[in-house]
Amino acid sequence: MVILLLLFSLCWSLTLDEAISIALRNTSDIRLSELELRRVEQEIKKARARILPSLGASYSYRRLDDSLVFGFSPRDRQEYSLTLTQTIFNKAVWDSISLAKKQKKLQELILEDVKREVVYRTKEMFYALVYKKLVLKLKRDNLKYWEENLRFVEEKYKKGIVPKVELLRAKAQYELARAELKEAKTDYLMSVEELKAFLRIDGELKPEGSLKLSFPANLPPPEELERKLLERNTSLRVARARLELARGSYRLAKAEYFPTLDAFLTYEGFTARSFTGGTKWIEGYVFGFSFNYKLFDGFGREANVASKKIELLKEQEKLRATLYELRKELRNALLSISSLKARIEATQASLRASEEALRLATERYREGLTTYLEVLDARNNYNKTVESLHELLYRYFVLVALVERLTR
């Protein structure tokens, strides 16, 4: 598929590939997804920190009242400690690390899915813009045709060849053509603004030139497309990753049933009164283990595990629904493409016939061999056929882009 959209100087020159490149750089959805991925990467570091040794220090100073000073307690009491703690066994810590990695994988897939969606939306808006540009050109040609016709009828009216009613009809048709051109131009400019806002382009964007599409598109067989859908579709891969994340959350909730074991090493010191009445420091090491197990918490663990189990079942159902929805979307798109292809080929044949009918009606009217109504019908039929062909091609290539979005 080749799309060429040429611009004159002093304006943006924009092809489809350039539009996609700009969208991938500027779209807010992609930027937000990239920031979320960076946040998730920090969550992995945060989870890993729980298995690394921790080192803490503390110091305190207290001055005691005379009534509290007795025995070996000094008036000015100081204490300090330096503690090293290492987790030996904590299943929740290991499961949280695994869960953080799954979150990162999910966010990477979400980012890729967002990019695919941005590419599809860019193609859709770009095709709409070019379609409306072709319609605008058609309306300009139509106005030119009816303008020339009005001059011709005016000359014949001045010579007394045609009645006034035909002159009024020619003027009415000319004014209608002007109104249609203005409407088409407004619609086209609105599409330009929509594309500029999506791409975040400042300044003036005035695409000029013609659109060239290779028709029909060369698509693989439906069976191969369905296989690619199952293997490559990013939305489906995101749904699978969400299911794995739900499994990880379920395992993390069950990890609360396991005990924890930590080791610690502390070097501490404090001041005490000596036998001579002075103050001295007492210092030394403390080494030990800490074994913890939660016997009962009011069924809080059970409720948390049950909740995570329900979330897991929900993600399983969402994955199943996503699969069937994407399959339906792909199959419907392929059916529509087949139907549009047949309609486009038929419309192309009708266009050739309507062009010839308009040429003959115009010549016959100028020779006085037919009525003005025949020319009017022939021109309207030609306009509708051309506009219909443009619309069918626009819809066709949007559907092709959708198939690419679903299978790549």
Image (tube, grey):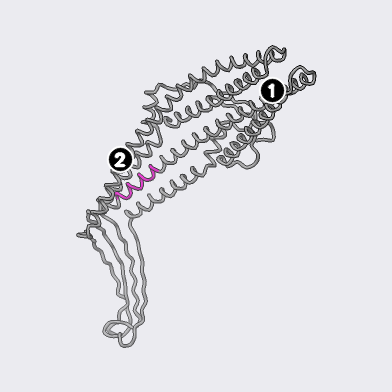
Of the pair 122 and 187, the residue shown nearer to us: 187
Using residue 339 as the reference point, say whether residue 272 is left or right of it.
left
Please name the amino acid that badge 2 sits on.
Gln
Q: Position of residue 228 (x, y in %)?
A: 39, 28
User: Where residue 168 appears, x then y in whole percent?
Assistant: 71, 26
One can see residue 291 in this view: no
Identify the magenta region: 94-106
Q: Residue at point 42% right, 25% down? A: 334
Residue where numbered disc 2 is placed: 316
Q: Would you place residue 303 above or below residue 75 in this image?
A: above
Q: Which mark is residue 266?
A: none
| 88 relative position to 144: left or right | left
Q: Quadrant of residue 315?
A: top left
- Residue drawn 64% across the image and 31% down it: 180
Question: Is 96 included in the stretch rendered in magenta?
Answer: yes
For label 1, the residue is 145
Q: Earlier in the sequence, mark 2 or mark 1?
A: 1
